[in-house]
Image: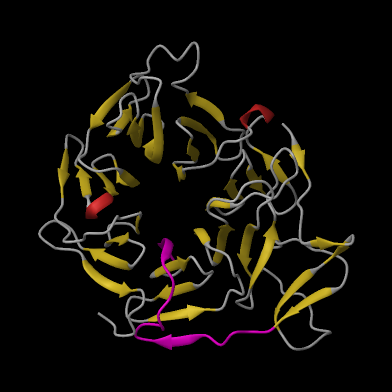
């Protein structure tokens, strides 16, 4: 297994440690609470605080990029301009991040919050990295994730549990951070891959990347489990060579869903496929491109996509859910048996289950709470 040293902001060989919201040049570095942040010797960089705004709905923001459930309930929603919004079930407030790049992913575990930050379509050296919320509420750069050529990579997906954080960046920069070191999850030949989606389910990682599916134990290297372009593809595969994967969800090793496009013809047909531990089958061919998959159980799996598409799998078949939404639903999340939350680039919606219609709980660029 290859390892590489965590790279934290450096200039002229002088490491800079962010000390959060303080005007005191001698202020102590914040403690993350569990010792998982990086301790760096050297001068500290002072960052002034941006006051937290509290209101029924914060002032207008740029387009929305990601959402997840937040510690203690509620939601966290990020934007393309590096903003972070927190919803407690009744009201929204904007948290200061001091990040001026798109926040592409959010992960929480316990009281910890991690952000994947980066540029959408940059090539070569990229800005961004893995950020962590410190005990004082500030967000600090935890690590700049490097590819195998030691170039910074945008972090598109972040996952976390009680002992590790996983950052999935461009150019094969898939890494696990355990508070001490960063460990590659893929071999050198995986250069050029990006993570289109990643999920942590039943103690295992599942990563959809450029038409391939990787899986592995949460603290093990990833293994390629499906490669439709291989000269000798697995005998159980049910796909042609020209397919892309855009989303993944799982409840167990024998209950894995992937969604993407069949590109064997100019039609680019959307599909959802299922792996039962032995065989792959095409589970559904939806009418729209799938942008997100979310699994609560083997009998409650959701798929969302273009033109407000929302589907539910009940263990037997996929059924459409009328949303009244015209925009693409790019992300789904929920906690336990509670509401399902839907994200578009312009709004957050709450869906309470059969018989209910999704209702907006937040609209970007609108000062009036819905």
Q: Residue furthest left?
A: 355
Q: Is residue 36 visible?
A: no
- Which quarter of the image is occupied by the C terminus? bottom left
User: Height in image: 221 above or below 328?
Assistant: above
Which one is nearer the viewer's eye here, 339 or 291?
A: 291
User: Height in image: 213 above or below 83?
Assistant: above
Which one is nearer the viewer's eye here, 254 or 53?
A: 53
Q: Is residue 88 visible?
A: yes
Q: Main secondary structure of the magenta part?
A: loop
Residue 286 relative to residue 83: left or right: left
How many dots with numbers? 0
User: Which residue is drawn at the image coordinates 41% and 67% (left, top)?
Assistant: 63
User: Which residue is drawn at the image coordinates 23% and 41% (left, top)?
Assistant: 299
Residue 60 relative to residue 120: left or right: left
User: Height in image: 116 above or below 236?
Assistant: below
User: Which residue is drawn at the image coordinates 46% and 14% (left, top)?
Assistant: 233
Give percent across and percent down for residue 39. Answer: 79, 63
**Which residues lie in the magenta part?**
48-70
Residue 58 in the magenta stretch? The answer is: yes
Give percent across and percent down for residue 10. Answer: 81, 61
User: Which residue is drawn at the image coordinates 59% and 46% (left, top)?
Assistant: 169
Which one is nearer the viewer's eye here, 320 or 68?
A: 320
Give percent across and percent down for residue 213. Answer: 47, 31
Residue 74 relative to residue 173: left or right: left
Colour option used: secondary structure
Give percent across and percent down for residue 274. Answer: 31, 30
- Which quarter of the image is occupied by the N terminus? top right
Residue 56 in the magenta stretch? The answer is: yes
């Amino acid at each position: 297994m290859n390892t590489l040293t965590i790279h934290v902001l450096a200039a002229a060989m002088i490491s800079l440690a962010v000390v959060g919201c303080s005007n005191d040049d001698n202020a102590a570095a914040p403690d993350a609470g569990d010792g998982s942040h990086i301790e760096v010797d050297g001068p500290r960089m002072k960052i002034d605080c941006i006051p937290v705004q509290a209101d029924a709905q914060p002032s207008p923001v740029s387009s929305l990029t990601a959402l997840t459930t937040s510690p203690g309930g509620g939601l966290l929603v990020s934007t393309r301009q590096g903003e972070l919004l927190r919803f407690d079930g009744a009201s929204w407030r904007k948290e200061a991040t001091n990040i001026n790049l798109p926040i592409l992913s959010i992960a929480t575990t316990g009281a910890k919050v991690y952000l994947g930050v980066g540029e959408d379509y940059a090539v070569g050296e990229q800005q961004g990295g893995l950020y962590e919320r410190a005990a004082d509420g500030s967000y600090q750069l935890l690590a700049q994730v490097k590819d195998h050529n030691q170039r910074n990579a945008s972090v598109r997906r972040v996952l976390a549990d009680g002992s590790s954080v996983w950052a999935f960046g461009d150019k094969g920069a898939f890494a696990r951070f355990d508070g001490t070191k960063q460990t590659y999850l893929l071999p050198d030949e995986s250069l050029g891959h990006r993570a289109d989606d990643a999920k942590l389910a039943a103690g295992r990682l599942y990563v959809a990347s450029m038409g391939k599916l990787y899986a592995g134990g949460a603290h093990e290297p990833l293994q390629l489990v499906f490669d439709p372009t291989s000269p000798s593809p697995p005998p159980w595969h049910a796909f042609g060579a020209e397919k892309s994967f855009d989303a993944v969800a799982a409840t167990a090793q024998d209950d894995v869903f992937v969604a993407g496009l069949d590109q064997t013809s100019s039609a680019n047909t959307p599909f959802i496929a299922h792996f039962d531990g032995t065989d792959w089958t095409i589970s559904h061919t939806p009418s729209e491109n799938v942008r997100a998959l979310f699994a609560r159980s083997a009998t409650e799996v959701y798929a969302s996509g273009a033109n407000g598409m929302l589907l539910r799998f009940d263990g037997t078949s996929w059924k459409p859910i009328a949303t009244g939404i015209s925009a693409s639903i790019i992300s789904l999340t929920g906690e336990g048996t509670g509401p399902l939350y839907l994200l578009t680039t312009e709004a957050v919606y709450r869906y309470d289950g059969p018989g209910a219609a999704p209702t907006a709980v937040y609209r970007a660029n609108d000062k009036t709470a819905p």
